[in-house]
Amino acid sequence: MAVYVKIPTPLRKFTKGDATVSVEGANVGEALKALEAAHPGLWDKVIDGKGKVRRFINVYAGDEDIRFLDGLETEVSDGAEVSIIPAIAGGQ
């Protein structure tokens, strides 16, 4: 099933500038693995060495943060949108 992954600007160098990439996957983890297969280097920017989403990266399935669902095992339906969102900090 097709899943549309939204890529943040800092990671678009891996997707040749594409803001959205269509991949296949039944859950978020499968979609991210398919994204890595199509665009090598992205996995390590999103997932740490323990297989968890990096601390300063948020991944959403639709409007829900996967950390509050089933993590990388969060199921997605055909046509679902997965968003990779780097956390932003700073200011005064």
Image: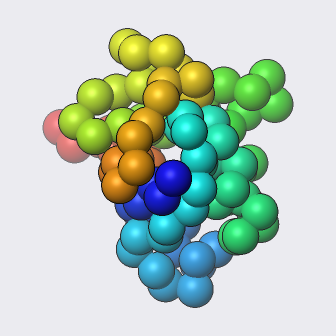
Expressed as whole percent of the image width and height from the top left, the position of residue 43 reads 71, 50
Expressed as whole percent of the image width and height from the top left, the position of residue 83 reads 38, 49
Which residue of the protein is positioned furthest toward the bottom in this rendering? 16
Considering only vertical position in the picture, is 14 above or below 75?
below
Expressed as whole percent of the image width and height from the top left, the position of residue 29 reads 63, 36
Instruction: Report if residue 64 is visible in the image.
Output: yes
Which residue is depicted at the point 56% across and 39% down?
A: 26
Comparing 10 with 89, the one in front is: 10
Comparing 30 with 14, the one in front is: 30
Expressed as whole percent of the image width and height from the top left, the position of residue 70 reads 49, 15
Which residue is depicted at the point 34% across and 27% down?
A: 65
Considering only vertical position in the picture, is 59 above or below 66?
below
Which residue is depicted at the point 40% across and 41% down?
A: 77
Which residue is depicted at the point 51% across and 53% down?
A: 1
Q: Is residue 9 left or right of residue 34?
A: left
Q: How many tags in the picture?
A: 0
Comparing 10 with 19, the one in front is: 19
Snapshot quadrant of residue 35: bottom right
Which residue of the protein is positioned furthest toward the left in this rendering? 92
Instruction: Report if residue 5 is visible in the image.
Output: no
Quarter of the image containing the C terminus?
top left
Considering only vertical position in the picture, is 56 above or below 85?
above
The colouring scheme, among rainbow, by chain, secondary structure or one colour, is rainbow
